[in-house]
Amino acid sequence: MDIINAIILGIIQGLTEFLPVSSSGHIELGKAILDAEIKEDLLFTVVVHFATALSTIVIFRNDIATIFKGLFQFRWNDEAKFSVKIILSMIPAALVGILFEDELEALFEGNILLVGCMLVVTAFLLYFADKAKNTEKNVSYSNAVTIGIAQAIAILPGVSRSGATISTSVLLGNDKTKAARFSFLMVVPLILGKIGKDILSGDLALESSQIAPLAAGFVAAFVAGLFACTWMINLVKKSKLTYFAIYCLVVGLIAIGYVIYDTFL
């Protein structure tokens, strides 16, 4: 992979990890458009995902510090309760990732039709969530499990993880800003866990020719992630998700149309 493609794909990862338009779906579309063979480049995937996780940590550093401070008090306080909710939300996606790893990998093989259909589903989910009334309700334990199930479904390419989790939380009646905060914090342990698993697998191999593209992709994903995370929180708060619903619908229909054209014409 050259540096230009690495930067482009890094930006795509950084933006779409937080914006409700599906990072996996756009990476698949980006690979098809750029003709970039990055499916086998596990190291690049690990690097850009670490960059987006790091950008989340930077944005929510005060929240994370408060959570850890509260946990070390060893009391059943708000921080401990929030941590339990985060753990509950992680379980569905973790189970799906472990039990159906091979089946999921098969879906990430240029399946543009699936991406298009799932983007359309994401569009409708965002639209209905945007019309929900805002409240001051916190995420409950049962909500955390339901949001976690939404995150597990969002493993499918074309379903936005942030879109699915934030929309599900909002439709459950939770405060929109708190929904976005919970959505972004709940994914950090999963990303770091997946990165750790990939590192321990021994499948990562670094060659000298990869250093520049990896560095470029990391910086691009990190900077784009900082911007997108901050922007997304404001957009959810101001009920601006309809714009992304329209975008997902248009891109999804274009992807479906492309497959139909390529298959029958």
Image: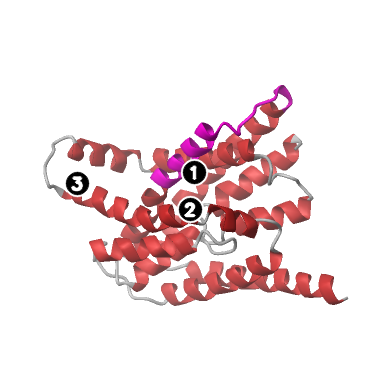
Measured from the top left, where is residue 242 in percent x and y?
51, 72
Query: What's the residue type where badge 3 is placed?
Result: Ala
Mark 1 surroundings within 10 Å by alpha-carbon count, few (fewer than 14), some (14 through 19), many (20 or more): many
Taking the spot 29% from the left edge, 43% from the top edge, the residue there is 63
> Closer to us: mark 3 or mark 2?
2
Image check: 191 left or right of 265?
Answer: left
Image check: 93 left or right of 40?
Answer: left
Could you say which quadrant of the image residue 11 lies in? Answer: top right
**In terms of depth relative to the viewer, which is nearer, 134 or 265?**
265
**Are the residues tagged 3 and 2 within 8 Å (C-beta)?**
no
Real-space Cα distance between discs 3 and 1?
27 Å
Mark 3 surroundings within 10 Å by alpha-carbon count, few (fewer than 14), some (14 through 19), many (20 or more): some
Image check: 251 left or right of 222?
Answer: right
The residue beneath circle 3 is: 80
Quadrant location of the N terminus in the rendered image:
top right
Residue found at the very far left of the displayed protein: 75
Taking the spot 69% from the left edge, 39% from the top edge, the residue there is 6
Taking the spot 56% from the left edge, 44% from the top edge, the residue there is 224
Query: What's the residue type where badge 1 is placed?
Result: Leu
Measured from the top left, where is residue 80 in percent x and y?
19, 46
Real-space Cα distance between discs 3 and 2?
26 Å
Query: What's the residue type where badge 2 is placed?
Result: Gly
Say which label, 3 or 2, has the lower sequence index: 3
Measured from the top left, where is residue 87 in percent x and y?
30, 50
Residue 97: mark: 2
Say which label, 3 or 1, has the lower sequence index: 3
- The region drawn magenta spans 188-209
